[in-house]
Image: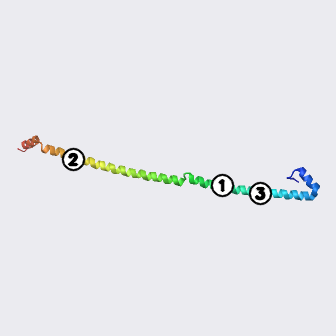
C-alpha cells in the first residue's frame, strides 16, 4: 500500500488508533487528495479553455481578419475603378478639345487668308 503521509506519521497513527483505523484514515486522506487533485485539474482545464476563448476573441477583434482585409481590398479596387473612369473622361475631353483647337486653327487660317489683300488680288487674277 502506498501511503501519502510520511511513514513516521503513519506509525504514530498506528500506535494511537490501531493499524486498521490508521489505514482507513490514510485511505480516506488519499481519496480526498485524489478528489481534490481531479477537481483542481478539471477547474484548471475549464479556466484554460475560458482564457483561450477570451484571448481568441480579443485577438480576433484586434487583428485584421480576412473579411476585413477583403473589404478593404474591394474598397481600394472600387476607388481605382473610379479613378480609371475619371481618367477616361479626361482623355475624351482632351480629344474633343484637340479637335476643337484644330477647327479653330483652320478657321483662323482661312479668315486670315481671305482677308489678306494679296490673296484677294491673287483670286482676282485667277478669276479674270
Q: Residue 86, position in %: x, y?
A: 36, 51
- Helix, strand or loop under label 1: helix
Residue hosting label 3: 38
Nearest to the observer: residue 8 or residue 122? 8
Between discs 1 and 3, the one toward the N terminus: 3
Residue hosting label 1: 51
Residue hosting label 2: 104
Residue with the most extreme top position: 118
Q: Residue at x 78, y 57 (%)?
A: 36
- Helix, strand or loop under label 2: helix
Nearest to the observer: residue 57 or residue 18? 18
Which numbered dot is residue 110? none
Q: Residue at x 69, y 56 (%)?
A: 47
Check the image and tell me how it is coloured. rainbow
Q: In the figure, 121 relative to 53: above or below?
A: above
| Alpha carbon distance from label 2 to label 1 | 78 Å
Amino acid at each position: 500500500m502506498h501511503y501519502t503521509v510520511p511513514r513516521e506519521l503513519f506509525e504514530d497513527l498506528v500506535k494511537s488508533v490501531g493499524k486498521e483505523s490508521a489505514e482507513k484514515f490514510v485511505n480516506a486522506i488519499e481519496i480526498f487528495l485524489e478528489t481534490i487533485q481531479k477537481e483542481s485539474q478539471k477547474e484548471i482545464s475549464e479556466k484554460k479553455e475560458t482564457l483561450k476563448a477570451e484571448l481568441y476573441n480579443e485577438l480576433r477583434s484586434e487583428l485584421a481578419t480576412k473579411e476585413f482585409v477583403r473589404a478593404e481590398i474591394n474598397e481600394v479596387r472600387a476607388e481605382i475603378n473610379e479613378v480609371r473612369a475619371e481618367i477616361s473622361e479626361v482623355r475624351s475631353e482632351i480629344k474633343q478639345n484637340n479637335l476643337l483647337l484644330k477647327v479653330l486653327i483652320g478657321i483662323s487660317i482661312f479668315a486670315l487668308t481671305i482677308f489678306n489683300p494679296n490673296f484677294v488680288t491673287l483670286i482676282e487674277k485667277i478669276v479674270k
